[in-house]
Amino acid sequence: MSRPRLLIVDDDPGVTTQLKWALSDYELSFASNRAETLALVRQQPPPVITLDLGLPPDPANASEGLQTLSEILRLAPGCKVIVVTGNDDHEVAMRAVAQGAYDFYEKPVDPDVLRLIVERAMRLYALEEDNRRLAAAGNGAFAGLIAGSNVMLGVCRSIERLAPTDASVLLLGESGTGKEVLARAIHALSPRHAARFVPINCAAIPEALLESELFGYERGAFTGANRQSKGKFELADGGTLFLDEMGDLPLALQAKLLRFLQERVLERVGGREEIAVDTRVICATHKNLSTLIAERLFREDLYYRISELSIAIPPLRERPGDAILIARSLLGRFRQLRATPVRDFSPSALAAIEAHPWPGNVRELENRVKRAVIMAESPVIEAADLELEAPASNGFRTLREVRDEAEAGAIQLALAASRGQIGKAADVLGISRPTVYHLIKKYGLH
């Protein structure tokens, strides 16, 4: 298996040697100026580039590095560029990020921090590439679904297991969580995939018309019925019928649906002939059906019939990292639909996306990104363009902060378990006694 490619742009031989050892897990290539860099990018754009902003012919200033950054992003918009700055160049680093750089790190190089930044950039690039391939294919089982969080990937694995069966499925989740996308995935992965997938929203059709929409009607069944018409059940014969917002189905139709699920036959409105139909039924709702059953608004026997298999779809706020992945994918889609200079989100915008609770879930996120692409006045979308409040901090913790907290917690737990005996704590942690003393002093533990 080939290693991920990484381009290092720096004119300092000492730094390139250090980076060569620190990043040996990657297939490395090197450039020392703008011309060499752009030639390599044109030849084969790498997923990630580390770019020193101080490049010849003016290494004391960042102008050449910023110009190189601009041309890299023009040639390879999906490339993740990590800029390198000095300790006193924070303002320049922020300009680079505003211009479209993925992240930055300061000299002198800390190998651990740099490896983490590069690894995170590689992972994001790979996820975006996977989503682009799915979008381009358009016919993948999970087309339209973007997920990287463990909780949502678990849902996808459940879908893959239940799809080949013919059991009735109930999808539970808030509005905008992608219930229809997952219903289509179940159909695409099932033996019925060659037949039709027929969706209907039970809450969007007036009660007086819903029965004829579902079960069809005979000519003369009611005023205006000038011809025979098949309903959604018959249209989905051999395939899958998706009943969205099942919690809004009237009680009279619940009884008729229950009879169909039990006997697999139906009668059209105004008809007397029993028609056998072979269709798999997938239901979805954002309502609490147990509450509706207690209030006698939903039949308990129907609930057990439609929920042979139930899948709870988590809201976007409970899917760590997915909001950013979805936002970037939406940005790429909207950029293709309209000519726009917008290229990326600023760090504060990404932090705001991750911090927002998204009561409208993916649908709300889509609306905000679309509006921002239209209204943004710079190449980088800010939190204000999304009509979100930027967090006081960037919303992300550094590796050093996470590591320090984990170390301090581990030392405290080991000391408590060993009743304060340093030797036993060292054995539990797999480190030496002097290291335990050092960490106790470092974190001010007692």
Image: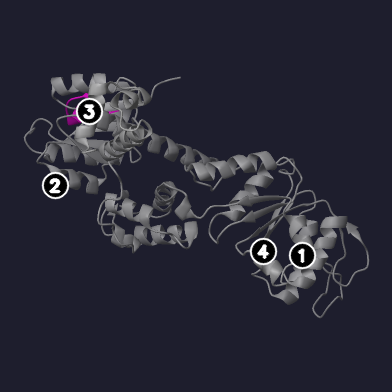
Label 3: element kind: helix
The nearer-to-camera label among 2 and 1 is 2
Q: Nearer the viewer, residue 6 or 247?
A: 247
Magenta segment range?
31-40
Q: Which amino acid does label 3 sit on?
A: Tyr
**Label 2 – label 3 distance at C-alpha:** 39 Å
Q: Give the class, few, some or many, for how many residues have Cα within 10 Å of label 2's Cα (few <14, many ≥20).
A: few
> Disc 1 and disc 4: Cα gap in Å?
21 Å
**Disc 2 + disc 3, Cβ < 8 Å:** no
- Counting residues from the start of the chain, the first of labels 2 and 4 encountered is 2
Label 2 residue SS: helix
Q: How far apart are labels 2 and 4 at the CA level?
A: 54 Å
The crowding category of the residue bearing disc 3, from other C-alpha atoms within 10 Å (few below 14, some 14 to 19, many at least 20), is some
Q: Name the residue under label 3.
A: 437
Residue name at image x 27 percent, y 22 percent: 29
Given this view, does label 3 or label 4 mark the residue nearer the observer? 3
- Residue drawn 14% across the image and 30% down it: 108
Q: Give me the C-alpha separation between circle 2 and circle 1.
A: 62 Å
Q: Tag 4's secondary structure?
A: helix
Mark 2 highlights which residue?
91
N-term-proximal mark, 3 vs 1 = 1
User: Would you call the spot at circle 4 few (<14 residues within 10 Å), some (14-19), or many (20 or more)?
Assistant: some
